[in-house]
């Protein structure tokens, strides 16, 4: 099992910057505004020859019982319990504060190894603040600048005494290259939960986990970072990303929200299946349609989840009406699974997880070449391509070049003259014939080489 270190400290001392430095990616949002980090975030850190799990936490801060601030601190306390050691971070430019002293006592009471890190230690002011930190009684401070990468050698030396030499190496495939069906069935499915603010994304994931892992609140915009959690459902592994709510661009004013939205979009690109959550009382709004279109353009499998179903008055044929509405408003992902759920009550969760697996299987599907050729001939005979400027368009043959999503190359004459409406006809026919509901389908046109083009004309 990997050695785990939790980064703790008061707000705005640079914990997320240090986290990003150690994992080698900008996974955690960083901003000058205090309290940006809310949920705890885990990542695989590498510092020279040391490999370990790192947990970024919300700043240790006091708040009224039941408030968002208090629940953020509960998340931090949980991270401390899970960790094998702690990195207690202070801001060397500011020096020691009463809050630093109070939470140094908190760190000591955890009864775990503590590495004292004086961040932002560059320059004279940083040197003075680092010297002050001796007063905390947590040993020699490691002076670093997480932003500029200074002092990483000293931090390595301090951590070497704690981190075991052997650590797990967890490599994940992060691209859309084809994999075998057997491999696809064994790998964890990467799932991003997206939607407008306050659609209930975090509540749903908490129910799947069976614990209050992610912060929830009636206030829209509680989630900021895209947080990844591991879920096992009926012996199948899932890596689920909770994301910030996506609003229309014109309504996004704060810099922090722009960063959160960019983080959510990265999660969509990294995912294999995207669950688009809608509020049952306000479904298929303009922003929902934009989000679904984004998922289709990114080539991800999509599942539509209508949340807060427990608040809707029950009427006959409601589910079939959802199916009709989805196909009407989202023709580009026609047939995409749509599931009515209640993240709060746990209603429809089994159906949702089944739909995710089915969408993933369709997204990975490869069609038999012989069956594809038979379909192609029948589709052209049933609806021949239109003539353009009095000349027939000739479609030669089609082949599948990859899955994830199903992608095809159509060899033809005059590729630039084939209407988009005819391509939509072929895509819809493919969906219906081969049972490919909802998944994006790509058809690329390629002109077949003219075998006589190299021959020179005879002189007259």
Image (cartoon, grey):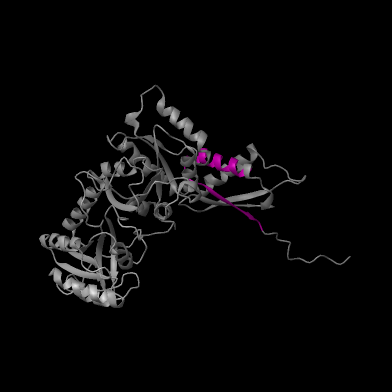
Quadrant where the image shows the C terminus = bottom right
Instruction: State whether residue 43 is above or below residue 190.
Output: below
Q: Where on the picture, by quarter, is residue 323?
A: top left
**Residue furthest toward the top?**
316
Residue 436 visible in the shown view: no
Q: From the top left corner, tell me how far across and down residue 322 is, in percent.
A: 44, 31
Q: Residue at x 50, y 35 (%)?
A: 327
The answer to which of 355 and 73 lies nearer the viewer is: 73
Q: Where on the picture, by quarter, is residue 309?
A: top left
Quadrant where the image shows the N terminus = bottom left
Q: From the top left corner, tell me how far across and down residue 421 is, in percent.
A: 63, 42
- Horizontal arrangement in the rendering, residue 62 relative to residue 200 (left or right): left
Residue 439 counted in the magenta span: yes
- Horizontal arrangement in the rendering, residue 81 relative to residue 335 (left or right): left
The answer to which of 238 and 393 lies nearer the viewer is: 238
Q: Which portion, as a residue range, is magenta?
A: 422-448
Q: From the top left corner, tell me how far across and down residue 387 is, in percent.
A: 73, 43
Q: From the top left corner, tell me how far across and down residue 258 is, in percent.
A: 43, 53
Q: Where on the picture, by quarter, is residue 340?
A: top left
- Horizontal arrangement in the rendering, residue 318 relative to residue 372 (left or right): left
The answer to which of 296 and 454 lies nearer the viewer is: 296
Residue 15 visible in the shown view: yes
Instruction: State whether residue 445 is above or below residue 46.
Output: above
Residue 127 counted in the magenta span: no
Instruction: State whether residue 420 is above or below residue 136.
Output: above
């Amino acid at each position: 099992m990997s050695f785990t270190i939790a980064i703790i400290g008061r707000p705005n001392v640079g914990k997320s910057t240090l986290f990003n430095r150690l994992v080698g990616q900008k996974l955690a949002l960083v901003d000058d505004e205090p309290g940006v980090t809310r949920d705890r975030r885990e990542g695989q850190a590498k510092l020279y020859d040391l490999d370990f799990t790192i947990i970024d936490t919300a700043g240790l801060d006091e708040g009224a019982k039941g408030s968002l601030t208090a629940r953020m601190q509960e998340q931090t306390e949980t991270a401390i319990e899970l960790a094998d050691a702690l990195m207690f971070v202070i801001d060397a430019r500011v020096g020691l504060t009463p809050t630093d002293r109070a939470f140094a006592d908190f760190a000591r009471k955890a009864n775990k190894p503590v590495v004292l890190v004086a961040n932002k230690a560059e320059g004279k002011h940083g040197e003075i603040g680092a010297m002050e930190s001796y007063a905390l009684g947590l040993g020699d401070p490691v002076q670093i600048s997480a932003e500029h990468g200074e002092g990483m050698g000293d931090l390595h030396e301090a951590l070497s005494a704690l981190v075991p030499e052997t650590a797990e190496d967890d490599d994940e495939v992060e691209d859309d290259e084809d994999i075998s069906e057997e491999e696809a069935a064994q790998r964890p499915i990467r799932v991003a939960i997206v939607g407008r603010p306050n659609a209930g994304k975090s509540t749903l994931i908490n129910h799947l986990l069976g614990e209050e892992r992610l912060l929830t609140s009636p206030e829209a915009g509680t989630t900021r970072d895209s947080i990844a959690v591991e879920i096992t459902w009926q012996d199948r592994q899932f890596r689920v990303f909770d994301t910030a709510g996506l609003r229309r661009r014109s309504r996004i004013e704060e810099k922090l929200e722009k960063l959160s939205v960019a983080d959510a979009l990265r999660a969509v690109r990294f995912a294999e299946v995207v669950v688009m959550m809608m509020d049952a009382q306000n479904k298929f709004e303009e922003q929902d349609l934009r989000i679904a279109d984004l998922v289709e353009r990114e080539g991800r499998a999509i599942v539509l989840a209508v949340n807060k179903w427990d608040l809707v008055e029950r009427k006959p044929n409601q589910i079939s009406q959802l199916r009709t509405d989805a196909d009407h408003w989202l023709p580009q992902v026609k047939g995409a699974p749509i599931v009515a759920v209640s993240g709060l009550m746990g209603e429809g969760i089994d159906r949702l997880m089944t739909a995710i697996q089915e969408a993933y299987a369709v997204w990975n599907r490869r069609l038999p070449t012989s069956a594809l050729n038979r379909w192609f001939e029948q589709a052209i005979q049933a609806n021949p391509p239109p003539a353009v400027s009095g000349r027939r368009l000739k479609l030669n043959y089609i082949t599948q070049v990859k899955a994830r999503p199903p992608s095809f190359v159509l060899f033809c004459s005059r590729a630039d003259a084939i209407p988009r409406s005819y391509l939509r006809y072929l895509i819809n026919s493919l969906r219906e014939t081969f049972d490919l509901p909802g998944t994006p389908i790509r058809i690329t046109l390629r002109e077949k080489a003219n075998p006589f083009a190299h021959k020179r004309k005879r002189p007259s």
